[in-house]
Image: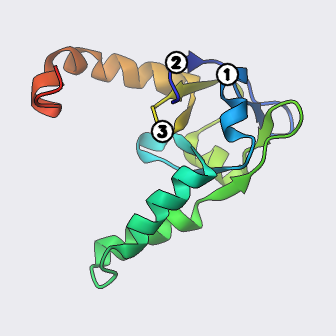
């Protein structure tokens, strides 16, 4: 399970050092893809494969499904962390997420999200008040 917030930096080669507590779970391979809200999603390979099967089973006769499938799968990069826990982030994925140097990696249970640190701070500022009020509406029966 991925939880918590971490603040690694991209190195000059566009590599990000994964938080140490997640490296074992990602050592077998991971998939980096464009997430919503202009962040990147990092899934363990097995988790991504399960999700990809479900997405691939959606009716491709629906134009929205085709667009989503194309965007998701074309924007995905498979990586394996090196011995120091670093993963290269492609130039296209860095551009999409606006990653320059300072990053924030958050745990989102089944995935990690990689954010530009300034974008993450803006997102929190914009959504914090709504979070405190939304739990009953968004997740009925959980709390």
Q: Which residue is mark 2?
A: 4
In the image, taking residue 60 as reference, residue 136 lies left or right, namely: left
Q: Residue furthest bottom?
A: 61
* Cα gap from disc 1 to disc 2, whole angstroms: 10 Å
Residue 100 seen: no
Where in the figure is residue 71, as x and y percent of width and height? 48, 65
Q: Label 3: few (<14), some or many (≥20) within 10 Å? A: some
Residue 102 seen: yes
Where in the figure is residue 84, as x and y percent of width and height? 87, 30
Find residue 81 and report its image quarter: top right
Q: Earlier in the sequence, mark 1 or mark 3?
A: 1
Q: Which residue is mark 1?
A: 21
In the image, taking residue 141 as reference, residue 124 lies left or right, namely: right
Find residue 132 and report its image quarter: top left
Q: Are marks 1 and 2 in contact (CB under 8 Å)?
A: yes
Q: Residue furthest right?
A: 83
Q: Which element is circle 1 on?
A: helix
Q: Earlier in the sequence, mark 2 or mark 3?
A: 2
Where in the figure is residue 58, as x and y percent of width and height? 32, 73
Q: Which residue is mark 3?
A: 110
Report the residue at 58% width, 27% height from top.
Answer: 105
Find residue 7 and report its image quarter: top right
Q: Label 2: few (<14), some or many (≥20) within 10 Å? A: few
Q: Is residue 11 above or below residue 65?
A: above
Report the residue at 48% width, 25% height from top.
Answer: 120
Q: Nearer the viewer, residue 98 or 43?
A: 43
Q: Which element is circle 3 on?
A: loop
Q: Which element is circle 2 on?
A: loop
Report the residue at 16% width, 32% height from top.
Answer: 138
* Cα gap from disc 2 to disc 3, whole angstroms: 12 Å
Q: Is residue 65 above or below residue 61?
A: above
Q: State which mark lies toward you, 2 or 3.
A: 3
């Amino acid at each position: 399970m991925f939880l918590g917030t971490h603040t690694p930096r991209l190195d000059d080669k566009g590599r990000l050092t994964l938080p140490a507590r997640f490296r074992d779970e990602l050592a077998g391979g991971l998939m980096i893809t464009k997430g919503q809200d202009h962040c990147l999603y990092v899934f363990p390979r097995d988790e991504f494969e399960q999700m990809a099967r479900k997405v691939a089973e959606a009716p491709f006769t629906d134009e929205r499904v085709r667009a989503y499938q194309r965007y998701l799968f074309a924007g995905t990069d498979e990586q394996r962390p090196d011995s120091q826990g670093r993963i290269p982030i492609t130039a296209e994925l860095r551009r999409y997420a606006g990653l320059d140097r300072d990053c924030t990696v958050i745990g989102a249970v089944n995935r990690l999200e990689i954010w530009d640190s300034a974008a993450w701070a803006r997102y929190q500022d914009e959504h914090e008040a709504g979070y405190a009020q939304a739990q009953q509406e968004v997740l009925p029966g959980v709390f």
